[in-house]
Amino acid sequence: MNSKHQYVELNDGHFIPRLGFGTYKPQEVPNSKTIEATKIAIEAGFRHIDCAYAYQVEEEVGLAIRSKIADGTVKREDIFYTSKLWSTFHRPELVQSCLEKSLKKLNFDYVDLYLIHSPMELKPGEELFPKDENGKTIYDHVDLCAVWEAMEKCKDAGLAKSIGVSNFNRRQLEMILNKPGLKYKPVCNQVECHVYHNQRKLLDFCKSKDIVLVAYGALGTQRYKECVDQNSPVLLDDPVLCALAKKRKRSPALIALRYQLQRGVVVLAQSLKENEIKENIQVFDFELTEEDMKVLDGLNRNFCYVAMQFMSDHPNYPFADEY
């Protein structure tokens, strides 16, 4: 594979692989599956591994990466590893502790990229989603600019090579970009992005600010019950996408991934199945025509699979704005 086409330069001079392996999975799937899938992904050629404190599989992902380092498949510096600051650690004095917990689980000295997982802060404590006696999620109140300053300190401490955000809208990004005394710009904004929700306006805004857009849910998510309405349309069954896939002799998943690459989006592919993982890496083996891209652009319906509706009354809820 031609490495020249596989990396994007971030605004801090580091390079991110254009295709990443996503490691989110629901609680009911055994963690051992994550170890296996991550090893398969590295063997298949994935070098960008996307994880997070909240996924609760960093120990397993770290184990898989370290075993592939031990057997000589990769060196630590070949792997681009992303972790994310969870919402219960937004208070500036807690930010570094969340990253340190991740590093300890991974048995790493640093992460390549550290993201604010969501702009919506939650009450600190052990629970990922703290709830009151009525089952309502308990929010916290922290200035996003103060969170960002703590992220900058993590970079200065050498614990994260690059820092960015996730699930931020334009207004929230501008808040950081316009912060007095900003030391580092976010290198990326990782958001849900696929042919049904192509984020055109947010992508254009990010490009104008030299911020990379990273797409999660690019295959229409894995439709896990805890976060996706089971009545929502199945993206990979879309008739237009399937017809194009047939025409190009590729799978619908490969077309959906390739679409993102050609728009300058860094794309995450998530699967626990060996055949799918190996297939997804083939996204560099073909190109879509301008006509194909137009057809896929036409599928956009601003449809969100992961809208976090249960937090829509949060003061920092990002999905109420147009983009």
Image: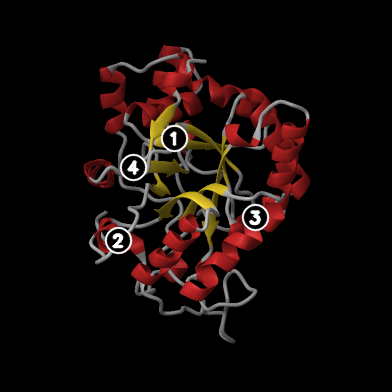
Tell me if label 2 and label 4 are in contact, CB under 8 Å. no
Q: State the CA–CA distance, disc 3 to disc 4.
A: 24 Å
Please tell me whether mark 2 sits on a helix, a strand or a loop: loop
Model colouring = secondary structure
Residue at left offset 43%, top offset 24%: 255
- Near mark 4 (Cα within 10 A), the count class, few <14, some 14-19 or many ≥20, is some
Q: Position of residue 6 (x, y in %)?
A: 45, 25
Residue at left offset 65%, top offset 30%: 42
User: In the displayed structure, would residue 126 be above or below residue 192?
Assistant: below
Q: Which residue is mark 3?
A: 103
Residue at left offset 36%, top offset 74%: 143
Q: Which residue is mark 1?
A: 15
N-terminal-most mark, 2 or 1: 1
Please tell me whether mark 3 sits on a helix, a strand or a loop: helix
- Near mark 3 (Cα within 10 A), the count class, few <14, some 14-19 or many ≥20, is many
- Near mark 2 (Cα within 10 A), the count class, few <14, some 14-19 or many ≥20, is few
Q: State the CA–CA distance, disc 2 to disc 4.
A: 14 Å
Q: Which residue is mark 2?
A: 182
User: In the displayed structure, would residue 120 be above or below residue 67?
Assistant: below
